Image: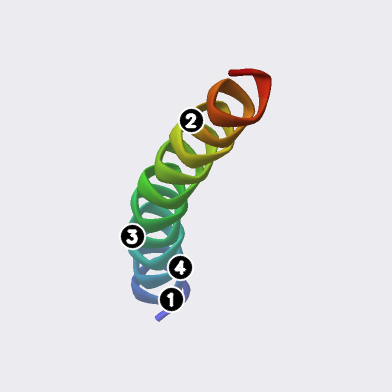
């Protein structure tokens, strides 16, 4: 039972990591583009 619980927690953590990784990449790119536009 504990092993199933831990497997589920690991799976959820990996999904959240993948989702957040995409978010931070897009956010970084957006901020970089905004800085370039401001400096022009």
State which tag comes first along the sequence, 4 or 2: 4
Between marks 3 and 4, how big is the CA–CA gap?
10 Å
Numbered mark located on residue 15 in the image: 3
Q: Name the secondary structure under disc 2.
A: helix
Numbered mark located on residue 33 in the image: 2
Of residue 40 and residue 29, the one placed in the foreground of this image is 40
Of discs 1 and 2, which sits in the foreground?
A: 2
**What is the crowding at mark 4: few (fewer than 14 residues within 10 Å), some, or many (at least 20)?**
few
Numbered mark located on residue 9 in the image: 4
Give the residue furthest to the bottom: 1
**What is the crowding at mark 1: few (fewer than 14 residues within 10 Å), some, or many (at least 20)?**
few
Between marks 3 and 1, how big is the CA–CA gap?
16 Å
**What is the crowding at mark 2: few (fewer than 14 residues within 10 Å), some, or many (at least 20)?**
few
Percent of width and height locating residue 7: 35, 63
Q: Name the secondary structure under disc 4.
A: helix
State which tag comes first along the sequence, 1 or 2: 1
State which tag comes first along the sequence, 3 or 4: 4
Percent of width and height locating residue 37: 54, 29
Q: Looking at the image, do the residues carrying marks 1 and 4 touch, with CB atoms under 8 Å apart?
A: yes
Of discs 4 and 2, which sits in the foreground?
A: 2
Q: Looking at the image, do the residues carrying marks 4 and 2 touch, with CB atoms under 8 Å apart?
A: no
Q: Looking at the image, do the residues carrying marks 3 and 1 touch, with CB atoms under 8 Å apart?
A: no
Q: Looking at the image, do the residues carrying marks 3 and 4 touch, with CB atoms under 8 Å apart?
A: no
Numbered mark located on residue 5 in the image: 1
Of discs 2 and 3, which sits in the foreground?
A: 2
Between marks 4 and 2, how big is the CA–CA gap?
36 Å
Of residue 7 and residue 33, the one placed in the foreground of this image is 33
Q: Quadrant of the N terminus?
A: bottom left
Of residue 32 and residue 27, the one placed in the foreground of this image is 32
Q: In this view, does 8 lie above or below 36?
A: below
Q: Name the secondary structure under disc 3.
A: helix
Percent of width and height locating residue 34: 56, 36
């Amino acid at each position: 039972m504990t092993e199933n619980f831990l497997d589920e927690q690991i799976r959820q953590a990996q999904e959240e990591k993948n989702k957040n990784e995409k978010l931070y990449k897009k956010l970084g790119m957006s901020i970089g583009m905004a800085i370039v536009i401001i400096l022009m």
